[in-house]
Amino acid sequence: SQQGEEDPQALSIQEGENATMNCSYKTSINNLQWYRQNSGRGLVHLILIRSNEREKHSGRLRVTLDTSKKSSSLLITASRAADTASYFCATGLIQGAQKLVFGQGTRLTINP
Amino acid sequence: GAGVSQSPSNKVTEKGKDVELRCDPISGHTALYWYRQSLGQGLEFLIYFQGNSAPDKSGLPSDRFSAERTGGSVSTLTIQRTQQEDSAVYLCASSITRQGIEAFFGQGTRLTVV
């Protein structure tokens, strides 16, 4: 079964607005990562947050992690048309630590 | 190499034939993963290698699927007697063997079984 589940499945906003995507997971993790996928091919790593961290920033990206609720959120500020892509969270499990388990993804569309 | 390389990029095969998909990880990366992604869906974990050994094969969907890795580098995913439901993009990723390190993905192999 999938470890991570993203919410919403699809999100459509206007350019310039902020986009927030959420991820929930089931078991204890070592870290949580967010990836981006364009055109259904290779994924690109965006940001990693460790289980002892609560918030992390990278450019226009802000990630939060709440281990008590087993959830994370990815915020993209001042969205651009080029941000249109699918976004996936992946959890690095404590057991089988190198195994990355992905959710179903959020399809983000930025309208110009 | 500069990145994770997968071949072929696209493969069309007839139902019942065997196929081999190849993954060249980034040099020095000891962890290697195979995932499968059906159209519009998430990534389904197939198998994970640490060096040449596969501590987790739990995701292989049936005994028609197998994978090996030789020399701690190149990996081959083999699908025997392909079925139409095997049609998907097969993605390979590698990472340095240390917890919390990002995975680098190849561009995938799009497999179509007709």
Image: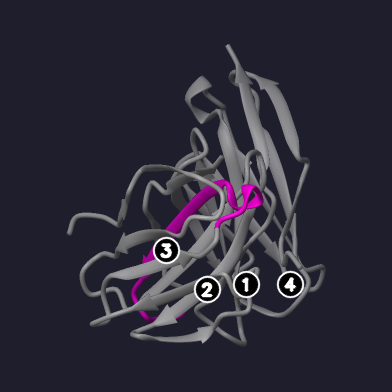
Look at 52% across and 30% down and name the residue there.
A83
Q: Residues within 10 Å of mark 2 (few under 14, many from 20)?
A: many
Helix or strand or loop: what does disc 2 sit on? strand
Q: Which residue is mark 1?
A: B59
User: Label 2 is found on which chain of the structure?
Assistant: B
The percent position of residue B21, horizontal first and vertical second, equals: 38, 58
Given contact means CB atoms under 8 Å apart, are the residues at marks 3 and 4 in contact?
no
The percent position of residue A6, horizontal first and vertical second, equals: 73, 50
**In whole angstroms, how far apart are the C-alphas of marks 3 and 2?**
14 Å
Disc 2 marks a residue whose amino acid type is: Ile
**In whole angstroms, how far apart are the C-alphas of marks 1 and 4?**
26 Å
Disc 3 marks a residue whose amino acid type is: Ala
Residue B47 is tagged as 2
Give the foreground label among 1 and 4.
1
> Does residue A15 sit above or below A2 in this rendering?
above
Disc 4 marks a residue whose amino acid type is: Thr
For the residues beneath circles 1 and 2, the answer to whether they share a chain is: yes
Q: Which residue is mark 4?
A: A67
For the residues beneath circles 3 and 4, the answer to whether they share a chain is: no
Give the foreground label among 3 and 1.
1
Q: Which residue is mark 3?
A: B103
Look at 70% across and 44% down and name the residue there.
A21
User: Label 3 is found on which chain of the structure?
Assistant: B
Look at 56% across and 27% down and name the residue there.
A78
